[in-house]
Amino acid sequence: MNRNRFVPIIIAVSVVAGIIIGTFLANRFSGNRLNIINTSSNKLNDLLHIIDEQYVDTVQISDLVEKAMPQILSELDPHSSYISAQDATTANDDLRGSFSGIGVQFTIKRDTVYISSVIHGGPSEKTGLMPGDRIISVDEEPYVGEVVSNEETMHRLKGEKGTKVKLGILRHGEKRNFTITRGDIPVHSIDATYMLTSELGYIRMRNFGDTTYPELLMALAQLQQEGFKGLVIDLRGNGGGYLAAAIQTVNEFLPNDRLIVYTQGRKAKREDYKSDGRGSYQRLPLIVLTDETTASAAEIFAGAIQDNDRGIIVGRRSFGKGLVQQPIEFSDGSLIHLTIARYYTPSGRCIQKPYEKGHTEDYEQDLITRYNRGEFFNEDSIQQTGEQYKTTIGRIVYGGGGIMPDYFVAEDTTLFTPYFTQCATRGLIVEFCFNYTDQNRAELSRFETAPQLVQYLQHQHLVEQFALFADSKGIQRRNNMIRHSQKLFENAIYGNIVYNMFEMQDYLQYINQNDLTVQRAIQLYETGQTRPTTQSQELPNQKTQKKKVAQASPHSTIPTQPLHRFLLC
């Protein structure tokens, strides 16, 4: 009995001893890191408590925390980020393959939401909404003026499947009311699939999401029926997406047991991802197009093709985003994307371009820096600061950020003038095309195909009409410059109107006819240069395309193209 009385005392002493020993070992072998974290955490909590208790004005502590989270993460690297609970549900809509909404694309003009297109088979089409409609109220509340924004419009129009939203629509001066039941809206990863020539197929991939791989298989099956013998995959403008989607798609083109990519971090051990040999197009001649907006998962795809010497890369150096983010959710529904590792191509080079912690401004200005030093126009201006690596056949590739193309294609600015640049950067070309489409929609709707529409537009003197429009907006007419940039204006105006009236594929088919990178890809295929070699790959006429023309601006071509003008909801 006496012995049993001492059992609780012995257990208590053992627990205390264990705590003391555990604390000692933790401090001894972790450099007292736990205490540092706890101390810092307490310091932040103390600061918020002091502000709440003693600050001169009333402060919403939750708002302070929301604003502090992005600032803290920005001190780590350019891609660790915080997403609020309100934004978390829609953060990856573009990659999931579908979302719940009303099924329209819209743009905002003069503080009013204009419906630019209606998704075929979606809730809005079934209800009777039409391109050109103006949204003037949502759920019987006026929705015009300063309150209108892209974010607020998407917030009001998106929602859970089965819920309803009542829209007040202005159509040809008459107000109408529509009640729309939200439904699933598909989001596609592949913008275009068609034949560039009788043998060469083309696929434009905008991101890597949940549906990218099945969409790719369907696109390849379509091209197979059309008899393609070679393929161009256009990754320009592709900002990336899911790692798994990139691995699945590139696996379709690689032989068995080829390294696609590996990841490694301080706390994340190396993990290799290899091809399984099940791809149906392991020998198909392959050309991948990249530029400075090709990033992340798209660079994984391009890097795997290049390092395995499976195809050729054509265009300009890619963005250089090679940090792996893991989503971590908080109890309130908000989440962070925390960088836990880096991507490495099969040769061992890191895709990520250099950055300085806490200096995201310099990082975000990198593309302008590249432009200013001539990298878009002259291959010799590209600064290769990384280590050298070798592909499977011994070709030298470089680390230090981004994927360098095997064949460089300079941005063509020979037709640029200050007049064209000013019109483009102010968004006047896009605005003119939207107005023209809106005012002539009935006439333009007569044409069943984009080529028929373009043929009609060629006889409407649209460049002259645009010059009058630009003059009304304060840009003085410059006849010599207009003549010099005539072809640029025509391409931009016709392309935008085609996009307004048809689909993205129709737009891409039109502009690709004059796209230097696409034309280079066709030339390379026709001359049998789709397999990498250890010999120099520069074409005889490549040097003539390296000439820099000083009249362009860093953003001169962006506003003329409608790839990101309209938002989907």
Image: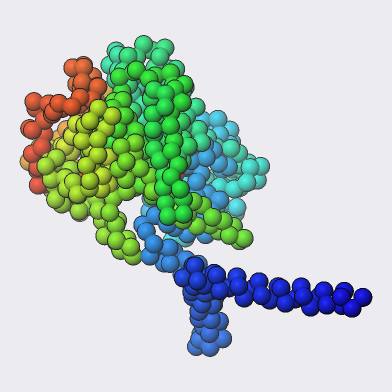
Q: Seen in the image, is 329 located left or right of residue 260? A: right
Give percent across and percent down for residue 34.
52, 70
Count of numbered marks: 0
Residue at (26% x, 44% y) in the render: 399
Please say which color scheme the image uses: rainbow
Query: Residue 436 is drawn in which quadrant?
Result: top left
Give percent across and percent down for residue 312.
26, 28
Q: Seen in the image, is 524 located left or right of residue 345? A: left
Residue at (52% x, 59% y) in the render: 84
In the image, 419 versus 161, the foreground residue is 161
Q: Say if residue 273 shows up in the picture.
A: yes
Residue at (22% x, 52% y) in the render: 368
In the image, 534 versus 504, the foreground residue is 534
Give percent across and percent down for residue 421.
18, 47
In the image, 15 versus 418, the foreground residue is 15
Query: Residue 430 is drawn in which quadrant?
Result: top left
Q: Seen in the image, is 103 located left or right of residue 225? A: right
Vertical comparison of 313 with 562: above or below = above
